[in-house]
Image (cartoon, helix red, strand yellow):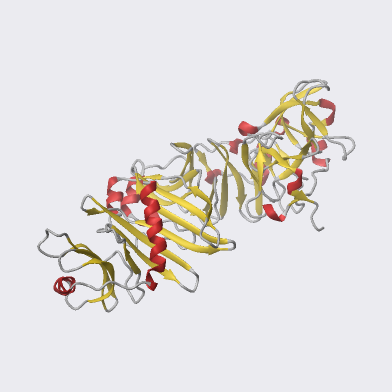
Amino acid sequence: MKKLITLLLMLAFAAGCACAEEVPALPQAVVDLCASVHPGYAIAAHDGWGNESCGQFALILKQGEDNILCMAEKAQDDSSYTLTIDNTNAVYDGDQLPSLLIDTGGDSLWYTYHDRENESSVHYGAVKSEGCWGQVSTLSYSPNENGISGMWSWVGDGKLWYEETDEDENENIRARWMYAPLEVSEEFAQSLELAKFDIDTFDADPTDGLYPLTKNEAFARSQAEDGDTLRDMDISRVHAARLFDSTKHFDAVGGRVCLRIDDWDGAFFKRVASIWFTGDAVMDTYHAGDGEVFIGSGVMMYSFNRVDEGSWVLTGVDDSGVRALGPDYIAPEGQTTVYRNDGYVYGSSPWGTLINQHMMLAPTYEEMYAQLDQNAYALVNNPNPADRLHLRAEPDKGAYSYGKFYNRTPVLVLERGDTWTKVQIGRGKNAITGYMMTQYLAFDESEKAQLACAFPQMQLREAYWERGALMLAAPNRNADSCGMFESNPNDFIIGVSGDDWYIVLRADGTVGYVPQHAFWDGNG
């Protein structure tokens, strides 16, 4: 499949340049065939190879606003040319005509729509195999600040695949990302065959190049479960989220719209969350990124984040003002202190796991505050705010230190002792577990509420603005990556390790190490 996609990409590039090359003459037999099958239509565009005895030609036939994509083909032993493709739905109607390209070796077609004003293009391609034209692949190009963004899709191995590329101004690929593939039915795969392809149904979304798949009945049926109806969906590199209407399910609290979230590990999907909403729920696919899902239901807007493989949490509720949540905290409403967690309330929460949650029962801010088990968390509390507290591998001052932490660093209390308390910083597989001295931790709610944050308000340097700085699982350049650290108000520098590393904590609970040279003091 990769070899096929590479071939299609090469042809797509050639299609963008085809307008400068001489269009081959059409055999009279092809002209006569088109006039016979579609009287009154003119041949508005064509490309291909051959003569009266054999050949292969792609054509656009036009009559008024109606356009038809045809393939006229004849082998040496055939008695005459025939239209092997005669599809009234494969191209747009109207005056906008695509450029056509048939590979000089035959059996590969691209037809391309160019947006000269926006310097973008959408390419539709198919390959003929064993005498039949296969599924249409799509490839879209659009300019970005530093070059070109590309997105192509294809069906293979029973799945719909997407791959995104970032290219420089010379069309050299700087980076590429695979999205979570979607399992599809044979009916859906057949609907993409060139002879059946409907460009209006499968028109690429100009914002990201992904098909609006819910418009395709064959795909929607293949994704539905237990008689449900697919309402909307979104995919990223690590997950697929689908919103279903349930005609059978009416539970005690009235839920009838189900959000199902599946994680993708590069080989298999795993169902990790199933969340119920009222019937007016809608999905915001425009703002969501990797490991994010946004759902609007009534006056509420909910945000969900993937905090670790197999773990999704509620991270935001908006009914009047934005209310930031994490797997173990509530941020104060109207929070304005950037890069500091003053006023954050930490504790174990019931929204830390989303399996079978009912969002129509989402609590108010006051109810959420009451549901937090604040005894589960303590905060670092150095008498001198300029000091930092060691996290030791063992309950001993001479034990290895994982780093030194600033006041108001949240720590999960695993075992409280008179001298040492065993704690965990962060969540998931990269959480750091060790020992801190009990006397330098704040446990009481009133004491924690009055404690001032001492996190440094450092900003990422310009080189890291677009994608963030790489977080590592240990203060070692050879350590495994654990994500990216960006300049978000709810992401913090919580400590230091040696003279070269900051310890950072993201809003989703991921903790890691970032070189100090990635940050600067800012311009005030």
Q: Residue at x 47, y 40 (%)?
A: 264
Q: In the rendered view, would you say 145 is above or below 336?
A: below
Query: In which quarter of the view is residue 106 placed?
Result: bottom left
Residue 108 in the image: x percent, y percent? 30, 58
Of 49 and 506, nearer the camera is: 49
Where residue 361 appears, x then y in whole percent?
55, 43
Q: Is residue 370 left or right of residue 104?
A: right
The relative height of residue 405 versus residue 148 in the rendered view (above or below) is above
The answer, for residue 510, to whether it is visible in the render is yes
Q: Quadrant of residue 416?
A: top right
Residue 427 figure quarter: top right
Residue at 13% over, 73% down:
36
Q: Nearer the viewer, residue 434 or 145?
A: 145
Q: Does residue 390 appear left or right of residue 513 in this picture?
A: right
Relative side of 181 to 199, left or right: right
Horizontally, residue 159 falls left or right of residue 297, namely: left
The residue nearer to you, when weighing 169 against 90, is 169
